[in-house]
Image: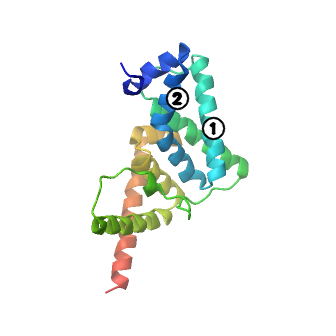
Amino acid sequence: MNVKMQKDQDLILQYLEGNEQAFEVLLTRHKSKIYTSIYLFVKDHELADDIFQDVFIKIIDTLRKGKYNHEGKFLQWALRISYNMCVDNFRRSKRRNKVSASETFDIFDVLESPDDNMEDYIIKGQSHSRIKSLVDQLPPEQKEVVILRHYADMSFKEIAALTSVSINTALGRMRYALINMRKMIGEKEAMYQ
């Protein structure tokens, strides 16, 4: 079987048997989502690069020590490591950054989408811009859940474990985020009437 078509778990086993290419495939397969989730939290390319490298050093170290349990959820595990490293970074710096796009990086540039015609592309760009603006205005806990759920594709159970809250708290934060976003949309529409 082609190495690129194999499951994450098979690639991990091959890497542990000395096949470096298997780990390269694993890294290539997931680097975009992992890097994006890191960048969304730290909002700084150099810091995101540093944390990204640290994440994969930790992954390699954990794999080599045989401490990775074979749940078959490599991406979620890697995202949890990256999230924890971002939190550690915030604790060290004693401040929490706002999550938003910068001039050089936009989360929507890395999200895959089918080819659209130019009108659809412009409309989608305007919609993404409005959504990003709304997400940026949310309280940090609500913003965090929205990002983890919609951009990192994590389940509420995974979000709860990652953020050390109950599933009900994670669900509640998402619910309040959606309520707040709807309210902000309603206020903007009222201004234009």
Per the image, the residue denoted by label 2 is 24
| Disc 2 residue crowd, few under 14, some 14–19, many 20+, Cα 10 Å | few
Residue at screen point 28% across, 65% down: 120
- x and y percentages locating residue 14 in the rendered image: 49, 16
Q: Nearer the viewer, residue 43 or 140?
A: 43
Give the secondary structure at mark 2.
helix
Per the image, the residue denoted by label 1 is 53
Q: Nearer the viewer, residue 191 or 31?
A: 31
Q: Amino acid at mark 2?
A: Glu
- x and y percentages locating residue 166 in the rendered image: 45, 41
**Res 165 visible:** no
Give the secondary structure at mark 1.
helix
Q: Amino acid at mark 1?
A: Gln
| Residue 148 against residue 132 in the figure, above or below | above
Between label 1 and label 2, give the one nearer the viewer: 2
| Residue 157 against residue 169 in the figure, above or below | above
- x and y percentages locating residue 150 in the rendered image: 40, 50
Q: Quadrant of the N terminus?
A: top left
Mark 1 touches mark 2? (CB < 8 Å): no
